Amino acid sequence: MKNEMHNYDIFPKVFPKDKEIEITIKPLGDHAAFKKESYQMEICPLTQGPRWAFPTMSGISDEFTVKPDADGCIRFKYTFRGEQEHFVRFLKEDSKKDFQFSVYSLDEDLCGRYPFAGDLHMHTCRSDGKQAPAIVAANYRRHGYDFLAITDHQRYYPSIEAINAFKDVPLEFTLVPGEEIHTPRGDAYHTNDVHMVNFGGRYSINALTTASSHIADVGYDINLRSIDGSGPDPISKEEFWALIDEYAKTIDIPEGVEPYAFACCSWITEQVRKADGLSIFAHPYWIADIFHVPEKFSEAMFEKKAFDAFEVLGGENYFEQNGFQSIFYYEQCAKGNKCPIVGSTDSHSSINNRNGFICSTIVFAPENTRESLIESIKDSYSVAVDTISAEYRMVGDLRLVKYASFLYENFFPLHDELCYEEGLLMKQYATGDEDAARLLKAINGRMKKQREKYFAF
């Protein structure tokens, strides 16, 4: 966290552009108190260049005098121009910078959309992960996530297990149903190994076939393969292969692309959409012996829009996966095949795992709900975040990445402190601490208050 954030609270941090807004700067402790009668302050738009170098191009940097109020806070009103970050800079007597804060003014479409961080693809001990679903959920909330989907291989019920584990306590953490989809394997032709993720679908796609591990583990209970009691009845693997063979005849499959696998991916996306979920094309550049998906197949997926969102960042720490996927994504955008993107860990352990927290997604959504998150990602209001190294990287539209970078530096450190406390209590609750439920109830609502404080929408 920046030193200024330890010493001062500045709010709001985000607000509409070209509209007068009152900013408050509150010292956090006597050591940071404003003890002078007045201070010189400068507002510097970040994107428009310094006045001394670009006198005809730069934006207006205003300098004026401010005075502390009786309560020790400094307040001022100002109209911040354009969508960009602004430095609120306090000056020494020689006009050099003493210290500064950052705020951000937004275009209208982002006003009313709050940043929610999360993960759309990870595993638990119900497939090939290490911890139970409730523990995984608690550990990721403690890390700073606002939403999460457990997406175990061929299994939807672990995500329901995580949801049910906390159904009797109030949380400001959204647990979304999900699964990683694997269709039944058959002969050399009737086999598809392209991985797709169902994020938020009302019912399981894996459990549409009796050959799935979901059915083998927990049977046909509709409450474990659906969040609302809906969903088609499962069919046998033979019936599934025949279904895909017929479905393949109804779609345009690009020449030179494995027809059965492509038909499977297109069918999966169609089914996820019917279930009101988000279909995610996962990790084509994962090195599973060799690259998991042929590049020509990935190109066809983009050209035919056979998914809803691309997992541009995944959970491996070698360059080839995330580096190649990012470049591939931008090349597809240049070809006119732009699509929504997400970043996920594909985590298999939520503790002592270097790869457990290296990618995430920031979604700009009106609410932290399953429906709002899915709709906002589909509308391309998301940024993928890479934290493999100490210096984070982001993938997405430039305007969203600039805004997300500001938030990563100036909002999320404060946000994550509240997440940590709720996540710690979630784990205590999940492991039988009777007092944790009372404490979860007591702290509920703090995240909402924090958003209302820092985002003046």
Image (spheres, helix red, strand yellow):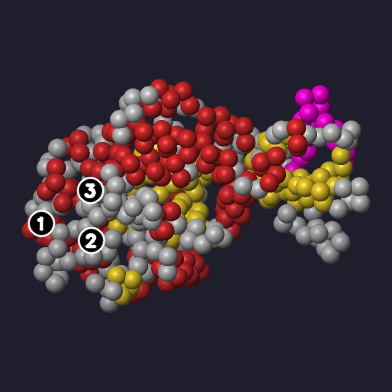
For residue 68: magenta? Answer: yes
Q: Is residue 201 left or right of residue 30?
A: left
Which residue bears the numbered disc 3? 126
Residue shown at 34% from the left, 31% from the top: 429
Residue shown at 17% from the left, 48% from the top: 214
Q: Position of residue 103 (x, y in %)?
A: 69, 44
Q: Nearer the viewer, mark 2 or mark 1?
A: 1
Mark 2 and mark 1 residues within 8 Å of each other at the beta carbon: no
Which residue bears the numbered disc 2? 264
In the structure shown, which secondary structural element does the residue marked by tag 3 occupy? loop
Amino acid type at image mark 3: Arg
Residue 405 numbered tag: none
Which part of the image, by quadrant, shows the C terminus?
top right
Q: CA distance from mark 3 to mark 2?
A: 24 Å
Within 10 angstroms of label 3, few (less than 14), some, or many (20 or more) residues? many
Amino acid type at image mark 1: Lys
Which residue bears the numbered disc 1? 237
For residue 2: magenta? Answer: no
In the structure shown, which secondary structural element does the residue marked by tag 1 occupy? helix
Res. 78 in view: yes
Amino acid type at image mark 2: Cys
